[in-house]
């Protein structure tokens, strides 16, 4: 017999909220319940500050519903519609012994991971994933221990860029081993969310998915974890930026005006959640004709540098529009790994050096001791 919404709400009466002891079904926090055969999907509304405290409730709700007859799969997401109210933020700051006006305490860090940086863009298709992958390989070339977390809920493409097939292995309990390629540890939301999950359900899942990827993956010791963020500056992106203990953000933009406008929104979003902007990368900046070597500034090149200056954030460098970048990126061999001496790889290395400098001492590679 098919499960009904009433059955689900009855099961959720047994799940209690930690602070009030109220039942989840009576709390008014359960969103629309989607039932598709034996699959049940719904979200629990929370304030962004409650994400960690509500994670056990999310799991309890999943297990309560999965026990019902006729249910084959349950997916419950935590949704934060709003940024935490400023009064709540202030109360929290005071609870942490901070004077109001000081930076908001960040989400809890990930043990073993020194710094987490986001690669973001105001709009899709500007080369965010290509930049993430090449920046990560370049940081590893500089001697850092690097991980990549693909948090792009709308189009996880990191597995393809690194040529990874297969699924991560469970190491213990719920903990997954990251995949490995080119000396990097890699985890993608593509491994956690099934491709058939409707787009509108992906947004509500961001908090649980990001929490899971940060905290239920055996990252080991990392100097930097590079996160490929979902494009755009909507609620899902804002929540993710808030829930990830970010040391800084890199904004990718193409030189077109429209992308720059979007980039400006990206910068504003990170400022809002008090994450420092490490800088702006101008991707597909200019084109060098492979036949004649002539350089063409097809998109009115230079806009990102100018815009970065105007916004008072560092300009990290420009990457040309190049067939070799596209082919290696789409072919699972990022150019910094497959052709490290190429000028394109050098462009990424220069960007990586600036990112490393922007992050300060904590990510400095241990000096290499040479015995002659
Ligand atoms: N500098 C470049 N030169 C040539 N091709 C590029 C360059 N950067 C990215 N591309 C190509 O452009 C396409 C989009 O790039 P990518 O997937 O990195 O963008 P994205 O911002 O992550 O997109 P999405 O929003 O879909 O996640 C890919 O086919 C990629 O290979
Ligand atoms: Mg992408």
Image (tube, rainbow, N blue to C red):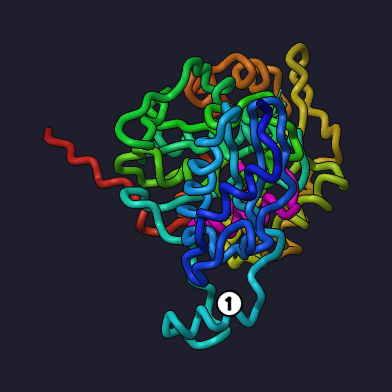
The N terminus lies in quadrant: top right
What residue is at 60 percent from the left and 63 percent from the top? Answer: 48
Q: Percent x, y for residue 176?
A: 38, 32
Above/below status of 39 relative to 291: below
Could one spot residue 297 in this view of the protein? yes
Q: Is residue 245 magenta?
A: yes
Ligand 1 has an atom within 8 Å of the beta carbon of the residue at disc 1: no
Could one spot residue 319 in this view of the protein? no
Mark 1, residue position: 89
Residue closest to the eye, 276 or 59: 59
Q: Percent x, y for residue 366?
A: 26, 46
Magenta range: 229-250
Above/below status of 20 relative to 235: below
Total labels: the figure holds 1
**Hey, which residue is sitting farthest front in the picture?**
1
Q: Percent x, y for residue 6?
A: 69, 45
**Hey, which residue is sitting farthest bottom in the picture?**
99
Would residue 145 appear left or right of 76 to someone viewing this image?
Answer: left
The C terminus lies in quadrant: top left
Would residue 325 appear left or right of 214 to someone viewing this image?
Answer: right
Q: Quadrant of ligand 1?
A: top right
Q: Is residue 323 magenta?
A: no
Q: Secondary structure at mark 1?
A: helix
């Amino acid at each position: 017999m098919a499960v009904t919404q009433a059955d689900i709400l009855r099961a959720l009466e047994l799940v209690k909220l930690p602070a009030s002891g109220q039942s989840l079904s009576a709390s008014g926090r359960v969103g629309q319940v989607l039932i598709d055969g034996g699959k049940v999907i719904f979200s629990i509304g929370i304030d962004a500050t409650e994400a960690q405290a509500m994670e056990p409730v999310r799991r309890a709700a999943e297990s309560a519903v999965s026990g019902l007859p006729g249910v084959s799969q349950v997916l419950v997401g935590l949704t934060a519609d709003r940024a935490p109210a400023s009064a709540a933020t202030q109360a929290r700051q005071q609870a942490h012994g901070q004077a109001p006006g000081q930076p908001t305490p960040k989400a809890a860090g990930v043990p073993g991971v020194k710094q987490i940086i986001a690669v973001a863009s105001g709009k899709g298709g500007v080369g965010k994933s290509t930049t993430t992958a090449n920046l990560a390989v370049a940081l590893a070339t500089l001697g850092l221990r690097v991980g990549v977390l693909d948090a792009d809920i709308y189009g996880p493409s990191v597995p393809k860029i690194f040529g990874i097939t297969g699924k991560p292995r469970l190491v213990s309990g719920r903990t997954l081993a990251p995949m490995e390629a080119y000396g990097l540890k890699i985890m993608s939301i593509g491994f956690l969310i099934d491709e058939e999950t409707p787009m509108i359900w992906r947004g509500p899942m961001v908090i649980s998915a990001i929490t899971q990827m940060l905290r239920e993956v055996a990252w080991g010791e990392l100097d930097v974890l590079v996160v490929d963020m979902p494009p755009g500056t909507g609620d899902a992106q804002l929540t993710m930026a808030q829930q990830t203990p970010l040391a800084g953000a890199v904004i990718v933009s193409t030189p077109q005006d429209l992308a720059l406008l979007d980039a400006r929104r990206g910068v504003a979003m990170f400022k809002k959640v008090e994450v420092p902007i490490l800088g702006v990368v101008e991707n597909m900046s200019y084109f060098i004709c492979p036949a004649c070597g002539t350089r063409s500034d097809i998109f009115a090149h230079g806009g990102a540098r100018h815009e970065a200056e105007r916004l008072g954030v560092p300009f990290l460098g420009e990457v040309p529009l190049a067939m070799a970048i596209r082919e290696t990126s789409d072919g699972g061999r990022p150019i910094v790994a497959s052709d490290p001496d190429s000028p394109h790889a050098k462009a990424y290395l220069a960007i990586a050096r600036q990112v490393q400098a922007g992050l300060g001492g904590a990510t400095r590679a241990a000096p290499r001791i040479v015995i002659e």
